[in-house]
DNA sequence: TAAATAGTGTCTGTAAGACAGTATACT
DNA sequence: AGTATACTGTCTTACAGACACTATTTA
């Protein structure tokens, strides 16, 4: 690749990071993955918990999404999660090292079939219940990012099939309903729930699944793991 | 302010920009504001139309939102529009000058009470019908950004009061319905529309408004210009 | 009075909520 | 048989769509 023929851009450039809020349902609670920043380092917020993330690597990352997938893979080993951009936050004050902007993503992953991995700069990696995580003083403005991620997740769960991405396949309708209830923090009527999911047509049957007790349930798989189904109830297109 | 006590960050930093897709309803069409890039400059995409935007000024802009508001003010003189972040796009290929990331916003403004202003680097500023703008070859990946902005706008219009921000106050229900129809590209039933808007409770009466012909209509003002109303039709919270 | 636009009333259709009932597994 | 869980049926409620109707202005 030839050197750029454009004039040099000499003004100061912001710091650019990517952060990822990874969610799962574990022990009947919505949990988020946090990373503890090294305590003895020269970096800001030593010893504080933070969302996994870090600086863009302009050599390694072809895009923002690539960078987010890399963070996710490095921390959990998961390669095909539900991953969506939440938004970006930038300003002069959020990082003591200078004007910085972060591109924040959120991901949904099943708690099983996943191993936590500590990275170079991270002493510890752990799941925290969302409410507990929000009460901590997270590094940078990560408390604000997490709050926005939880709000977005809860809002989308009201009209999409997102919680299916929190479960391993095959999943049952009762287990899916449980995931909805955990995320939303309220009970849902069983009959209405089942009608809605089955009418949605985004799942296919995958054989009976027996629990430890009671009647076995039908297992289901998603027809399309690349996107969530929408339950439209607005102005109905004609 | 003391100099930073943190070690120097020496790795290469991406270019960081903010772009804004500004929409209005004019001549029975949804229109977007585009800026023509200087034709004789040494910059990329000379002579191409682009969304208004540019590099973050780390001295002048306290945050991404501030930067977007500044772009909007510089091009249109509008100071209190509806402004919302759309997302961010970043990668090695989108700007020939190097790895770059843009933070894209979209804004809704009334076509009246606004004057277009050319800036330092912009030869021309003009409104284009969205369909025509999408057919042009815009600079950078702005075609993709515009497509995403239009998709987001149309999606949100289905369940929010967003089109009210495209009108000057006081506006009438027929004019609001017209704005909905222009954005969505389809007709809406009058009776259902009026029930929905009036039941929403986000407007207050502001006296009769006479058109040039026919019966005068009630004028309305938004109760809260800081956010749009939502028409929820999902899982109803109990 | 005619034309144009604003606004209302009534019926129907769809999907969610309430809740009671039936079905199938294990011990 | 008893218990635990999975699943279904029926009634009600909320609200959007269809569409015909009435109301108020100007020419």
Image (tube, coloured by chain):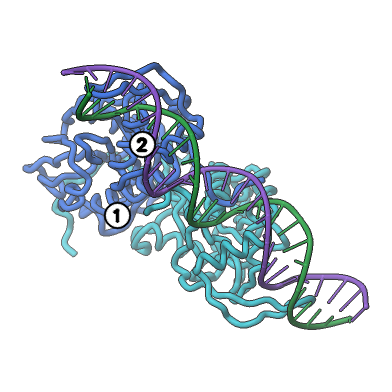
Chain colours: A blue, B cyan, C purple, D green
Left or right: B23 as drawn, with respect to A119:
right
Identify the residue at image location x=62%, y=50%.
B49
Instruction: Look at the numbered disc 2 and give the secondary structure of its residue.
Output: helix
User: How far from the left and from the top, in percent, is residue B220?
Assistant: 58, 75
Instruction: Look at the numbered disc 1 and give the secondary structure of its residue.
Output: loop
For the residue pair A233 and B76, the one nearer the viewer reads as A233
For the residue pair B86 and A229, the one nearer the viewer reads as A229
Say which quarter of the image contains residue B108: bottom right
Q: Which mark is residue A163?
A: 2
Q: Chain of mark 1?
A: A
Badge 1 vs badge 2, beta-carbon distance below 8 Å: no
User: How far from the left and from the top, in percent, is residue A41?
Assistant: 10, 42
Q: Chain of mark 2?
A: A
Q: Which mark is residue A79?
A: none
Mark 2 crowd level (few <14, some 14–19, many ≥20, 10 Å Cα):
many
Identify the residue at image location x=35%, y=59%.
B63
The residue indicated by pointer 1 is: A99
């Amino acid at each position: 690749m030839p050197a750029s023929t454009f004039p040099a851009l000499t003004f100061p450039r912001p710091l650019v990071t990517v952060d990822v809020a990874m969610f799962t349902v574990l022990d009947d609670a919505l949990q988020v993955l946090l990373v503890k920043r090294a305590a003895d380092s020269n970096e800001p917020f030593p010893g504080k918990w933070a969302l996994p993330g870090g600086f863009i690597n302009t050599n390694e990352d072809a895009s923002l999404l690539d960078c987010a997938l890399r963070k996710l893979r490095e921390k959990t080993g998961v390669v095909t999660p539900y991953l969506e951009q939440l938004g970006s936050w930038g300003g002069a004050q959020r990082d003591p090292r200078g004007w910085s902007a972060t591109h924040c993503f959120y991901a949904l992953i099943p708690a099983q079939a996943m191993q936590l991995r500590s990275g170079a700069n991270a002493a510890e990696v752990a799941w925290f219940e969302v409410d507990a995580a929000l009460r901590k003083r997270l590094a940078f403005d990560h408390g604000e990012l997490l709050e926005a991620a939880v709000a977005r997740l809860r809002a989308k769960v009201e009209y999409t099939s997102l919680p299916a991405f929190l479960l391993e396949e095959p999943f049952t309708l009762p287990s899916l309903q449980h995931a909805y209830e955990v995320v939303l923090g309220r009970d849902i009527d069983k009959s209405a729930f089942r009608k809605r999911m089955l009418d949605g047509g985004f799942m296919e049957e995958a054989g009976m699944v027996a629990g430890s007790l009671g009647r076995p349930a039908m297992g289901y798989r998603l027809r399309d793991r690349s996107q969530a189904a929408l339950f439209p109830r607005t102005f109905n297109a004609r």
